Image (tube, rainbow, N blue to C red):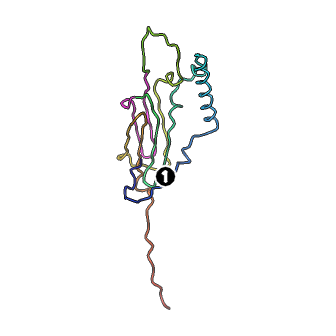
Amino acid sequence: MSRGNNTPGAVMTVRPVPSMTTRTPWNDMEALRRRMDDLFSSVTGYTPVSQLLNTSIDSDITPDVFETDTEMVFILPVPGIDPNEISVETTADTLTIKGERKPFFQNEGAVQHRQSWWSSRTGTFSLSYTLPVEINTDKVIASYRMGVLELHLPKAESVRPKAVKVSIAEEHKA
């Protein structure tokens, strides 16, 4: 997954970035509410009012963020979004991801009998993150595979850890 140190046998430590973690009890409660709405919708065939009122897809796209010694890695689930509709912009300390999810089926004469929460989440989105370290914007790599956007943001040389060799000083005799 990481394009960091490719030396055979090298050990890479990957750690979550605490300053960018957005998980809260409220997010967990929202996920539970969505699951209950989906269950209710599948049993009764009705779309819950909460799904009709909240059609933003910004809250549906939450990245996994990792930091290694050499890079920041963002993994974003973006199912149903055409990769050509996604733009990634970076500065030394900011990442912005924009895109649009379009409806899969559009026909004015069609009657919709059931709607999942996911299909109601269409439209544009814009996500912006302040990065905890400076990155090298010229070497950012973005790839899209099976509905997942993977971003590799190499750290700037100035913030990468550097090994310092300790020299042994000769003892002076007095």
Q: Residue at x 45, y 32 (%)?
A: 78
| Residue at the limit of the structure toward the bottom, as seen here | 174
Q: Is residue 142 left or right of residue 112?
A: left
Residue 159: image quadrant is: bottom left
Residue interval drawn in magenta: 82-102
Q: Is residue 19 above or below residue 42?
A: below
Q: Residue at x 43, y 70 (%)?
A: 165
Does residue 99 show up magenta in the picture?
A: yes
Q: Which residue is mark 1?
A: 14
Q: Is residue 137 left or right of residue 37?
A: left
The percent position of residue 125, horizontal first and vertical second, equals 47, 29
Q: Residue at x 55, y 47 (%)?
A: 19
Residue 95: image quadrant is: top left
Does residue 76 show up magenta in the picture?
A: no
Question: Which residue is at the front of the view, 76 or 166?
Answer: 76
Question: Which residue is at the front of the view, 169 or 26?
Answer: 26
Q: Is residue 127 above or below residue 168?
A: above
Q: Amino acid at mark 1?
A: Val
The percent position of residue 118, horizontal first and vertical second, equals 51, 25
The percent position of residue 24, horizontal first and vertical second, equals 62, 39
